[in-house]
Amino acid sequence: MATCPNCDYKLKLTDWRPECPKCGVNLMYFKMEERLRADADKAELEYAKGQPRIDRLKASVFGSPWAIVRLVMLLLPIGALMLPLGRISLNLPFYEKTTTVNAVEIYNAVSKMDFGRLFSLAGSDLIGKDVTLFLVSLVMILLTLVVIIVQLVFVVMSFGKKGYQRNVATAAIGAVLTLLSGLFFALSCKGFGAHLPGVFTGSLNPLGMCAVAITFLLIIAINLLIKMKGIEVKYKDVSEFLLPYNERPSVIAAKKEEEMKEEIKEEI
């Protein structure tokens, strides 16, 4: 059975009133202020422990002009992928089409692509190798897009363990994937052109692919520059919230002020 928190009286099933039948204290609101204060102390303590992490996150993104430049540069690969990366032309009976390869066309192609048929063509004796090279190129350019998104996530973790090394490694992976994607695309176009003469022509735009790779190299450079110059983290002072409520300087000062007011009232 429950007991009264004030007098330890053992409550009975017949004690249905909110007041203790022995001491009369309201069981529901007994020491409600202290309990609320304890809950508030726990919340403020968690806030004080988490605030330095938030301060470091803010510094990673907006802590210096170079950090803001880095944030903008992380979007450059997306813009570079909008440039012409290559060209594909199909010349079939009653059908001709020339497509400039870029991020938009890659998205449109992937959303409409019949991967089952592509995988079956990969087993063809005539163009199987060319289809495989094309699929590898496509996978690598899609992984490049994933790397771009991952970079945006990693930038807020720059002050974490090996944060700068992670940023540089991710950008380096993006550059390598871009160049390999261009290489496999060029090889697949060459193979298709040789095996399907007059039907398929394709070419890589080296300037477009190099532009994407260069944006990743610029991201590496800005990360190294930030590493050398450093970013000052402006920590918010939350030391007061690490102390018990009654020991906080602001609370003590407020109590003293109230006591002084009470003394002045008594003198008057």
Image (spheres, grey):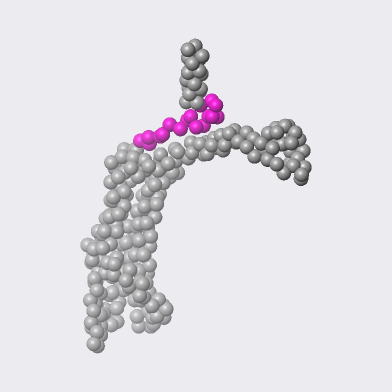
Name the side, left or right, on which 6 lies relative to 185: right
The foreground one among 230 and 192 is 230
Task: Specify start and end residues of the magenta stretch as a single range.
Answer: 232-248
Q: Residue at x 39, y 52 (%)?
A: 153
Say which quarter of the image contains residue 5: top right
The foreground one among 205 and 70 is 70
Q: Is residue 178 visible?
A: yes
Q: Position of residue 200 (x, y in %)?
A: 26, 80
State which quarter of the image contains the N terminus: top right
Q: Position of residue 211 (x, y in %)?
A: 25, 59
How many circles with numbers are drawn on the protein?
0
Q: Residue at x 77, y 42 (%)?
A: 12
Check if residue 249 falls in the magenta segment: no
The foreground one among 83 and 182 is 83
The foreground one among 71 and 6 is 6
Q: Residue at x 75, y 40 (%)?
A: 11
Q: Is residue 12 above or below residue 24?
A: below
Q: Residue at x 44, y 38 (%)?
A: 52
